[in-house]
């Protein structure tokens, strides 16, 4: 029986490309499965809700009611992949809540597989937050996202461990193009017949990495990640 995946895309810092990653993951899952559920925990515009309103609902972790509204569907094994675009303002409160309620242990019991995609920044807040996640999240469920558009000089050494997804930098004019609220990665793949374009190849490469990650996550029980991301390959234990 396949686990229900949850992808928590997060960073304690703004302007690192977190929502871009959440869009890529959400659109891929929608293309692959025909359905997905995304949660936008963000105060900044534009947010995931603006890009994918048909599969996204807003959530917050400000009070007990908001936390329950967010967490209840996450621990339900319904085989609908879920994506959380976790705003930087809610980063510490969210993971504090997860630690207090034993979220990781509860998901194992319910056959739900959460994976934290930490979008790296090059500052002390990002380093300290990553170290906190290392203490709280099992190693195979913590993936570092290296967005080369933001970190052109490479990952900080402390974050360059085994499990890294590298998002290649797009030229500024293409970055501006994909940031439009009307832009869809999947629609571009379908409409653009020239597979040699830089953007077409960029999307396909990212979708391939997400596909392999999703396979590893949904088959997580008894496995260690066979990474397509370059550093290591996860393999059956």
Image (cartoon, grey):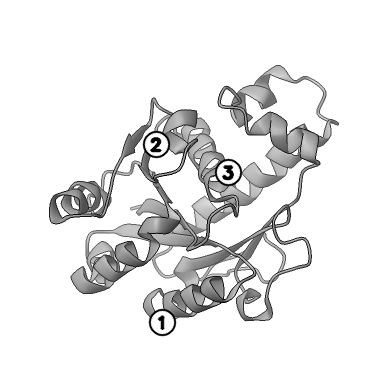
Mark 3 lies on a secondary structure that is helix
Q: CA distance from mark 1 to mark 3?
A: 26 Å
Q: Is residue 164 left or right of residue 43?
A: right
Q: Is residue 205 or residue 151 the one in the foreground?
A: 151
Labels 1 and 3: the sequence-earlier one: 3
In the image as oriented, which residue stretches furthest toward the left?
Answer: 65
Q: Give how far across and how far down residue 39 sits, in percent.
A: 35, 42
Q: Which residue is mark 1?
A: 135
Q: Which numbered tag is attached to residue 79?
A: none
Can the viewer see residue 231?
yes
Which image quadrant for residue 120?
bottom right
Residue beneath label 2, please? Answer: 36
C-alpha gap between disc 3 and disc 2:
16 Å
| Element type where label 1 sits in the image | helix
In the image, 75 versus 131, the foreground residue is 131
Q: Which residue is mark 3?
A: 20
**Residue drawn at x 24%, y 49% as measured from the top left:** 70
Q: Is residue 186 above or below residue 228?
A: above
Picture coordinates of residue 210, whole percent (x, y) = 58, 49
N-terminal-most mark, 3 or 2: 3
Q: Image point 53% across, 39% down: which residue?
A: 23
Question: What number of labels is visible?
Answer: 3
Task: Please tell me how crowded label 1 is: few (under 14), some (14-19), or many (20+) other residues with Cα within 10 Å.
Answer: few
Mark 3 residue crowding within 10 angstroms, few (<14) / some (14–19) / many (20+): some
Q: Nearer the viewer, mark 3 or mark 2?
A: 3
Give the label, 2 or 1, closer to the camera: 1
Q: Is residue 237 visible?
A: no
Alpha-carbon span between mark 2 and mark 1: 29 Å
Of residue 139 and residue 124, the one placed in the foreground of this image is: 124
């Amino acid at each position: 029986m396949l686990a229900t995946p949850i992808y928590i895309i997060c960073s304690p810092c703004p302007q690192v490309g977190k929502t871009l990653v959440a869009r890529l993951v959400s659109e891929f899952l929608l293309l692959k499965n025909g359905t997905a559920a995304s949660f936008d925990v963000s105060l900044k515009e534009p947010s995931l809700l603006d890009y994918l309103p048909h599969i996204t609902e807003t959530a917050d972790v400000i009070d007990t009611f908001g936390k329950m509204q967010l967490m209840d569907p996450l621990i339900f094994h319904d085989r609908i992949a879920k994506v959380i675009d976790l705003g930087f303002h809610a980063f510490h409160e969210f993971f504090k809540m997860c630690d207090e309620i034993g979220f990781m242990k509860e998901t194992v019991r319910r056959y739900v597989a959460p994976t934290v995609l930490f979008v790296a920044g090059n500052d002390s807040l990002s380093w300290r937050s990553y170290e906190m996640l290392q203490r709280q999240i099992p190693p195979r469920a913590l993936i570092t996202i290296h967005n080369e558009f933001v970190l052109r000089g490479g990952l900080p050494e402390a974050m360059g461990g085994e499990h890294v997804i590298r998002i290649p930098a797009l030229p500024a004019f293409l970055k501006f193009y994909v940031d439009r609220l009307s832009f869809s990665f999947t629609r571009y793949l379908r409409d653009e017949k020239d597979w040699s374009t830089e953007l077409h190849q960029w999307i396909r490469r990212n979708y391939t990495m997400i596909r392999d990650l999703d396979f590893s996550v949904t088959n997580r029980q008894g496995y260690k990640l066979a990474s397509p991301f370059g550093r290591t390959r996860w393999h059956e234990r």
